Image (tube, helix red, strand yellow):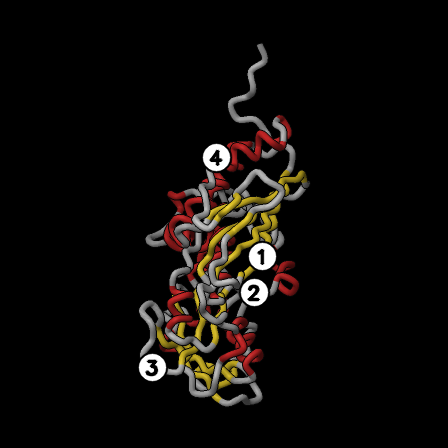
Amino acid sequence: MHQAPADPTIGELSEGEILARIAARTGRAASAIVGPGDDAAVVAALSGSVVATTDTLVHGPDFRLAWSSGYDLGWKAAAVNLADVAAMGARPTALLVALAMPNDTRVSFVEALADGLRDACDALAPGCAVVGGDLTVSATLTVAVTALGDLEGRQAVLRSGAREGDVVAVAGELGVAARGLSVLFDRFRDASGSPVPVDPARLGAGEADILRGQLRPSPPIGLGPMAATAGAHAMMDVSDGLGLDARRMADASDVTIDLMAATLGPDVVSAIEGGEDHALLATFADDVLPPGFRAIGRVVARGEAPLLVDGRPYAGPGGWDPYRDWDSVSG
């Protein structure tokens, strides 16, 4: 009798078998009326408004398999999308996940990825889960996630709403993910520049937590709806770096944002330049901020520069742009 391998590749199983293994691990969304298994999912949106966002992680520019486990990848794919929903002031309700994978990908890797998706949703946005998606074969491992959210009667908080006199505040970490990426690139590449697996014995004090911030970010998802309820004028997810994203908010709002260096921690450059922390950047009319947010600057009248630090124009790039920066990390 033929016996299937204990850990087959996806090329050795049918699409239905792979989907069944994924669906068995991802849980059920509280808002799902129809979940995985039909032509499309049906998700309740009690407020009548649905927030939708999508993000794609591609092997190479967005992650390296030598550094990221399947679980890490699933967690991060969920977290980065949940943060975008939260930044609109919405509660995440469901994820749609499309996987494009090489034929020799082990099913155990796909199952671990599904576990990471489930656990990130459970930890960061309880009640949210995978409700459907798609599978296909590709030479490059790619994870594309679409996230849905419910505004629950609130108005969406846009990046274009910052007003002169507002307090600029942030919830979450700044610069940690960038420091984790630096550890990976500085410590865990071979002589040719190719990534090699992380050896825990080579990590210094606190570096395991720093790496976790890069590989498994934990954005403050629940604080997005809280900020909206508290009257945030503008809000956005800090995915590409505080400097770059604060410029985007300033440009969208036709204001200038003045950050205070003393509020950005001991490594100001990492806090401004580093991306992938997925903190929430918001502006509020009052100095009394909702719990979890801390003041880092002020909104001032539009000047020649959209971004100031301690009153002076910030000249650095201030963040990550894959079209500009990919060549510098593609070794």
Q: CA distance from mark 3 to mark 2?
A: 30 Å
Q: Which residue is mark 1?
A: 54
Crowding at mark 3 (Cα within 10 Å: few <14, some 14-19, many 20+): few
Q: Element under label 3?
A: loop
Residue 193, position as x, y percentages in the image: 58, 49
* Pointer 2 residue: 320
Q: Is residue 3 left or right of residue 126?
A: right
Q: Compute the Cα span from label 3 to label 1.
A: 33 Å
Instruction: Name the residue that disc number 3 marks.
Output: 287
Please give the residue where the numbered disc 4 appears in the rendered image.
24
- Circles 1 and 2, Cβ within 8 Å, touching? The answer is no
Q: Residue at x 44, y 73 (%)?
A: 282
Q: Is residue 260 above or below residue 48?
A: below
- Depth check, mark 1 against mark 2: the one in front is 1
Q: Could you classify mark 2 by the number of other residues whose Cα lies within 10 Å: few (under 14), some (14-19), or many (20 or more)?
A: many
Q: Position of residue 243 (x, y in %)?
A: 51, 73
The reply to whether dot 4 and dot 1 touch (C-beta < 8 Å) is no
Dot placed on the residue nearer the N-terminal end, 3 or 2: 3
